[in-house]
Image (spheres, grey):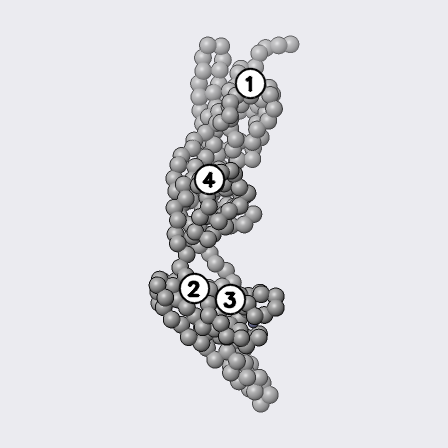
Amino acid sequence: MKQVGFHVGGNHDAAAERQGPHGQYLVIPHIESTPLTQERSDARTCVVDESLGENENEEDLVLVQCNTCLDGEERLHQVIAERGKGDGIDVRVRCETCSSVHVVELRPPRALKVPITLSDGAESHTDSISVDDDEIIAVGDEFEHDEQRWEIRRIESSTHDLIEAPAGEIRRLWAVRTDIVRIKVTYTKGETSTSEIWTVEPETVFTADATIETPRGLWMLRAIHTGRGRRLRGSEPAYMIRRIFLHALSRRR
Ligand SMILES: [Zn+2]
């Protein structure tokens, strides 16, 4: 499962993010220069000088798509000039591979607020999350929110549900808590019912019409209530469950 880069403790590895003069983000790859601490023979000095000559200033290299290179892949480009344009920046670059010069338009991503329904077992609430409008969100993506762990389960567009979509096309997200869920438990013995809340791992499976080990001993799990109604048979994972109904075991012989 991939991690979505929502604006909560974003961790970008290989490439470091640098904020440009106009608030835009440039992705600058880390480039390790040849270490200078090695024993210096004449030959080695020569090699070091040569590599320094190639990368005069590491900060001026950017990794962007090259439209001239046949495969259209991302290549290292030398920055020749930068010019502000609106809230973005136009960067004139030269491809390190094919030496062609082109202009890259860097524009700051627009931050969007996407409505999200967060289900924590029995409880659901509505909130919104901030994402870049071009960020791709997929079912199964995990993220942190309010110091809890959640997973995207459903992506609603204006017409139908999607498996993945850029944030700008999403009308609402649905997520379930994945570190822990709370389910309500009702014990019924004769005329008396009592309730409590269990916190369990989301994938814990509960089976209706079966005995269950509880803090109050063995009980019969009579029914499972999910968001879609009550079922008297079959199994459900905890993250689908709002409440389970337990009945005292009948004293049959
Ligand atoms: Zn190229």
- Residue furthest right as drawn: 253
Residue 7: x and y in percent read 41, 51
**Residue type, label 1:** Arg
Q: Quadrant of ligand 1?
A: bottom right
Q: Quadrant of the C terminus?
A: top right
Evaluate if marks 3 and 1 touch, with contact meaning CB atoms under 8 Å apart: no
Q: CA distance from mark 3 to mark 2?
A: 10 Å
How many angstroms separate mark 3 from mark 1 (CA)? 60 Å
Quickly name the residue at label 4: 158
Q: Nearer the viewer, mark 2 or mark 4?
A: 4
Label 3 vs 1, first from the N-terminus = 3
The residue type indicated by label 4 comes to: Ser
Mark 2 sits near ligand 1, with its Cβ under 8 Å away: no
Amino acid carrying mark 3 in the image: Val
Residue behind mark 1: 222
The disc label shown at residue 64, or none:
3
Q: Residue at x 57, y 28 (%)?
A: 236
Q: Nearer the viewer, residue 133 or 176?
A: 133
**Mark 1: which secondary structure?**
strand
The answer to the question of whether label 3 and label 2 lie on touching residues, with beta carbons closer than 8 A, is no
User: What residue does disc 2 label?
Assistant: 106
Q: Position of residue 10 (x, y in %)?
A: 44, 54
CA–CA distance in space, label 2 to label 1: 60 Å
The residue sitting at 48% across, 18% down in the picture is 187
Q: Is residue 191 above or below residue 131?
A: above
Mark 1 Cα-neighbour bin, 10 Å: few <14, some 14–19, many ≥20: many
For mark 3, give the secondary structure. Answer: strand
Residue 24 percent coordinates (x, y)? 39, 62
Q: Earlier in the sequence, mark 3 or mark 2?
A: 3
Counting residues from the start of the chain, the first of labels 2 and 4 encountered is 2
Q: Is residue 111 visible?
A: yes
Looking at the picture, does residue 238 appear above or below residue 89?
above
